[in-house]
Amino acid sequence: MHTIAHIKAQLNKLAAGLTLVLLTACANTTNKMVIAPQTPVVKSNFHAMKTAQLTVTDMRANSHVVAIHREGKAIELIPAHDHLDTVLTPLLKQAFINSGLTINNNAMNSIALFINTAEVDVYQSLMKYHTTSQLTLTAKVSAKEQTLTKTFKNKGSSEGVLSADLAVLERNLNQQISDTIALIVNDSEIQQFLK
């Protein structure tokens, strides 16, 4: 026969075990960056009467977009909620459509966008943080057996007290992406190169 003390001891062990499992599960939830930039504003309808194929390829070796560096600890890597090429394809497509370009998979012209770098590094200390971000996109435009390749870099940095807020990092990276796509679509060399 089990005594009340023995049953209490077993219930305490069970409660402690459940608490440990719950705490471990909460501690291991993975953060993901929500990459959802706004379609950039285009200057005019300068690609009217032009058609092109459009592709976006993620060339990065790593899938994370944020690396949090804390002294004496392993680097925490935070991925995007979706593949960056999947996110950027409709964004780039809509931006070019807004500029008057017709997207057609059978077009003679082609625009290939390569994602070379998309990363935010957070350097976290006890009472402050510093971030650096870099986005590098390469546009390769082919028209009438000629090719124009142009790389667009967008860098940023910030600092603050306590710890970096993931929502702020998301907002800043989304703005960087939107601004860089606007640079590509509004680029005068690309405009003149497309026939």
Image: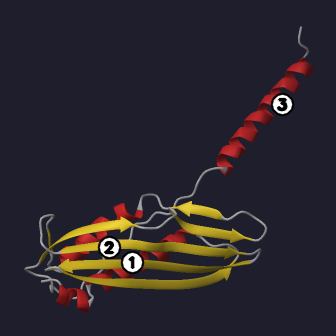
Report whether residue 135 is seen: yes
Q: Residue at x 23, y 69 (%)?
A: 54
Which residue has dot 1 on it? Answer: 137
- Lateral position of residue 32 relative to residue 192, left or right: right
Q: Disc 1 residue type?
A: Leu
Q: Residue at x 71, y 63 (%)?
A: 74
Q: Disc 3 residue type?
A: Asn
Which residue has dot 2 on it? Answer: 113
Q: Quadrant of residue 30?
A: bottom right
Circle on res. 12 = 3
Mark 2 and mark 1 residues within 8 Å of each other at the beta carbon: yes
Q: Residue at x 67, y 76 (%)?
A: 123
Label 2: element kind:
strand
Q: Disc 2 residue type?
A: Leu
The spot of residue 65 in percent (x, y) is 52, 67
Q: CA distance from mark 2 to mark 1?
A: 7 Å
The spot of residue 152 in percent (x, y) is 39, 84
Callout 2: few (<14), some (14-19), or many (20+) C-alpha neighbours within 10 Å? many
The spot of residue 177 in percent (x, y) is 40, 76
Along the line of sight, which residue is nearer the eye, 57 or 181?
57
Label 1: element kind:
strand
- Lateral position of residue 13 relative to residue 123, left or right: right
Label 3: element kind:
helix
Marks 1, 3: nearer the viewer? 1
Task: Specify which label sits upstream in the sequence, 1 or 3.
Answer: 3
Callout 3: few (<14), some (14-19), or many (20+) C-alpha neighbours within 10 Å? few
The spot of residue 180 in percent (x, y) is 37, 81
